[in-house]
Image (cartoon, grey):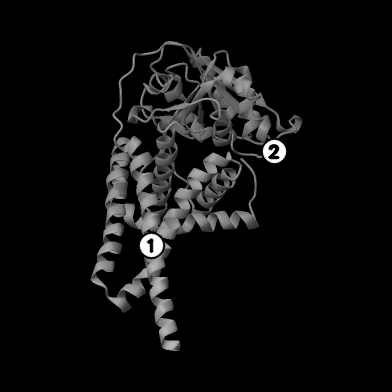
């Protein structure tokens, strides 16, 4: 009797695991082919050049060297009418001396200084709000002090995203390719995130943008009453704002390589972990629809591997050829789909060196994301700089 019971339990558990594994694999395939393939196989269209005036807003706190290296590349963009506004957020380095020189050299450059001792809200949001309020033009282009445009056509190409009375343009901010495991992890995570938010924007479900390369109108900012809906959260000036705004408006992704911004990746594991924890903590404030779509994808990826590892011992003990074929086929189908789509996205976003690492890093990050999310339930320090 006991033998029959254990045999029945073993067989039932085994079958349930295979059925659930197949169901999870199908969910993953739907995401890759119904959503992420939109970015992977989307042809880059050429648009008619635009010439509406643009205000480029850059916030900085103690970023002297980055501003020295990258601001001239922004100020010398090939675009007919634009201004660059630097919000100097109470820097105590040599930023003031650098801005004096740039003001003498560039007529389209303006500086707004913020004294932290007289502001009741700390962080980037207050600095960015001041910069947007001071802007002369309706079309805004936002980036960070540690970013440089990948070409002189950056402004032009990002502004071409304003089609069909669109109010938001989502750009891509990549990190420079350097040696080392940390740099590999940072760049993989960046393109993995871009695969999701750019693809979902193409699927008419935009949910976030990145402050390193983001454009929207001043009218939209004022209509949304700035960052007031989430002003108590010291970050989220990009993704939370876009997540709220796109409830009413669609967003156009611009991903051609000349429209990218380029940054230096975090130099230490601790700095990157803090950055990731902030991003994941912000995600809990997204609209329910966005959390459901992203959560379903992340959870199905995690359960795909957990179920696979759980099934393998059963396959070894049972050694049923048909079951081995079914499980192996589902695993290979997902792997081939993932590599094919991710490889095309890597090529499109000028991240070709990442292609070989997809299978290994997918497993690593599928495990890391839940760990980061869990750690945020215990402790997170909220700050910009």
Pick the residue in front: 281 or 246: 246
Q: Nearer the viewer, residue 108 or 125?
A: 125
Callout 2 crowding tier (Cα within 10 Å): few <14, some 14–19, many ≥20: few
Residue 244 picture location, percent across and down: 58, 32
Count of numbered circles on the image: 2
User: Would you call the spot at circle 1 few (<14 residues within 10 Å), some (14-19), or many (20 or more)?
Assistant: few
Residue drawn where x is 40% and y is 59% of the image? 304
For disc 2, the marked residue is: 232
In the displayed structure, would residue 91 be above or below residue 25? above
| The C terminus lies in quadrant | top right
- Compute the Cα span from label 1 to label 2: 45 Å
Q: Identify the residue under disc 1.
A: 19
Instruction: Name the residue: 42% across, 35% down.
Output: 198
Q: Would you place residue 183 above or below residue 161 in this image?
A: below
Marks 1, 2: nearer the viewer: 1
Whole-percent x, y for residue 334 in the image: 31, 53
Residue 141, visible in the rendered structure? no
Q: Quadrant of residue 228?
A: top right
Near-viewer residue (218 or 260): 218
Rendered location of residue 261, percent (x, y): 42, 32
Residue lying farthest to the front in this orientation: 1
Judging depth in this view, the residue of 96 and 6 nearest the camera is: 6
* Position of residue 344 in the picture relative to residue 243 (left or right): left
Are dots 1 and 2 in contact, CB under 8 Å? no
Give coordinates of residue 30: x percent, y percent.
Answer: 37, 46
Mark 1 or 2, nearer chain start: 1
Locate the N terminus and report the quarter of the image it occupies: bottom left
């Amino acid at each position: 009797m006991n033998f029959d019971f254990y045999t029945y339990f073993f067989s039932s558990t085994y079958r349930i695991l295979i059925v659930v594994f197949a169901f999870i694999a199908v969910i993953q395939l739907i995401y890759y082919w119904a959503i992420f393939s939109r970015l992977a196989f989307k042809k880059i269209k050429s648009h008619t050049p635009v010439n509406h005036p643009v205000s480029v807003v850059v916030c900085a706190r103690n970023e002297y060297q980055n501003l020295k290296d990258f601001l001239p590349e922004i100020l010398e963009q090939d675009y007919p009418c634009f201004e660059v506004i630097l919000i100097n957020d109470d820097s105590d380095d040599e930023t003031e001396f650098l801005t004096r020189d740039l003001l003498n050299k560039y007529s389209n450059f303006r500086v707004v200084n913020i004294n932290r001792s007289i502001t009741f809200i700390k962080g980037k949001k207050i600095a960015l709000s001041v910069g947007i309020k001071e802007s002369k033009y309706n079309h805004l282009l936002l980036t960070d002090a540690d970013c440089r445009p990948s070409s002189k056509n950056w402004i032009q190409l990002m502004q071409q995203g304003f089609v069909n009375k669109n109010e938001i343009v989502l750009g891509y901010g990549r990190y420079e390719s350097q040696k080392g495991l940390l740099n590999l992890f940072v760049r993989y995570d960046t393109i993995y995130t871009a695969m999701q938010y750019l693809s979902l924007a193409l699927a008419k479900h935009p949910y976030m943008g990145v402050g390193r390369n983001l454009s929207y109108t001043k009218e939209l900012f004022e209509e949304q009453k700035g960052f007031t809906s989430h002003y108590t959260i010291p970050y989220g000036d990009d993704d939370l704002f876009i997540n709220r705004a796109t409830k009413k408006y669609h967003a156009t992704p611009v991903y051609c390589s000349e429209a990218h911004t380029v940054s230096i990746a975090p130099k230490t594991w601790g700095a990157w972990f803090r950055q990731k924890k902030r991003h994941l903590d912000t995600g809990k404030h997204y609209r329910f629809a966005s959390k459901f779509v992203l959560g379903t994808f992340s959870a199905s990826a995690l359960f795909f591997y957990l179920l696979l590892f759980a099934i393998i011992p059963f396959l070894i003990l049972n050694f049923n050829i048909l079951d081995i074929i079914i499980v192996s086929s589902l695993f290979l189908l997902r792997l081939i789909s993932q590599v094919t789509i991710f490889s095309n996205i890597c090529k499109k976003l000028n991240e070709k060196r990442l292609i070989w690492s997809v299978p290994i890093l997918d497993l690593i990050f599928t495990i890391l994301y839940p760990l980061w999310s869990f750690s945020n339930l215990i402790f997170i320090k909220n700050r910009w700089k």
